[in-house]
Amino acid sequence: MTPLEELLALLDLERIEEDIFRGTSRDAVIPRVFGGQVAAQALVAAGRTVPDDRPPHSLHAYFLRPGDPGRPIVYTVDRIRDGRSFTTRRVVAVQHGRPIFHLSASFQVHEEGLEHQEPMPDAPDPLALPTAAELLPRYADRFGGPDVLDKLLEARAAVDLRYADEPPFGSVGEVREPRSQVWFRTNGKLADDPLLHVCLATYVSDMTLLDSVLLAHGRGGWAVGDVVGASLDHAMWFHRPFRADEWLLYDQESPTSQGGRGLARGRIFTVEGSLAVSVIQEGLVRVPHPRG
């Protein structure tokens, strides 16, 4: 299978009861389940209990415990509400008999209404930017282990993700404005399933969102090993239709960090300038204590 086919298989959960699903995991750069994977799988589980004419418009999630990539994850869906316009689902992800993740998602039938949006910020042409295969090997000597580069390349194989500026691991020790931009799209075409595109954007949304926190302090990130951390909570609002197999600009910033936590905000725009998704996440961001 191609890397994209493997990712799609990861999101194609096994239905073991009417509202119970099971998913597998893939290795990540850090020795736990990638948070974007759990969020995307939970949204898949919720979406499969909702009529097709009600796409998701928001999700709110908490990461409770690190996931074990060597064990299946069971997703239990609670049908909280089925209204005339809105449908609400709650999903709990369980491993080893304990919840590791909790998600609430809301779905809505299409409605006409008032409309406005922020303008799309300036950004370079994605095709003028280096691919992960071109960019990441330049910084291999900064990564925290000999296999980190291979894991990073493997994690980016299904998604073409391109940094508009130098990534945190490329400017270690340099304090920069807490803003970052990446362009992304899947490495291949997708079926015309709106839920699939939303779930893939959910998967990618956790890849780089905390980069802006790192830039404010000259830290290189998890791959470099000068911080340790994890996603704590994650919220997304889906405003307008988009395709995850077409270029999307992910504009990210961090307004604050404190108490071992960093807050980051993101906006995802289509190449035509439509504001498609808003994202907010708080993450655990700790500086490792020297040994001894």
Image (cartoon, helix red, strand yellow):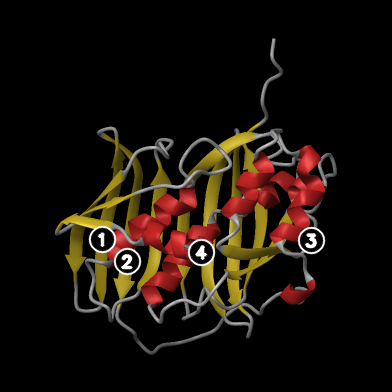
Q: Calculate the distance from the C-alpha at mark 3 to the C-alpha at mark 4.
A: 28 Å
Instruction: Tell which residue pokes out farthest to the bottom in this image.
Output: 112
Residue depth check, mark 3 versus mark 1: number of the one nearer the observer: 3
**Secondary structure of the residue carrying numbered label 2:** strand
Instruction: Determine whether, in the image, residue 281 is placed left or right of residue 139.
Output: left
Q: Compare marks 1 and 4 and give the one earlier in the sequence.
A: 4
Residue marked by disc 1: 89
Q: Residue at x 29, y 32 (%)?
A: 96
Task: Tell which circle, 2 or 1, labels the residue nearer the N-terminal end.
Answer: 1
Closer to viewer: mark 2 or mark 4: 4
Which of the two labelled residues, at mark 3 and mark 1, occupies the earlier sequence position?
1
**62, above or below 279, in the image:** above
Tell me residue 219's x, y (percent): 75, 40
Residue drawn at point x = 44 percent, y = 53 percent: 37
Measured along the vertical axis of the image, is residue 137 above or below residue 113? above
Say which amino acid is labelled 1: Arg
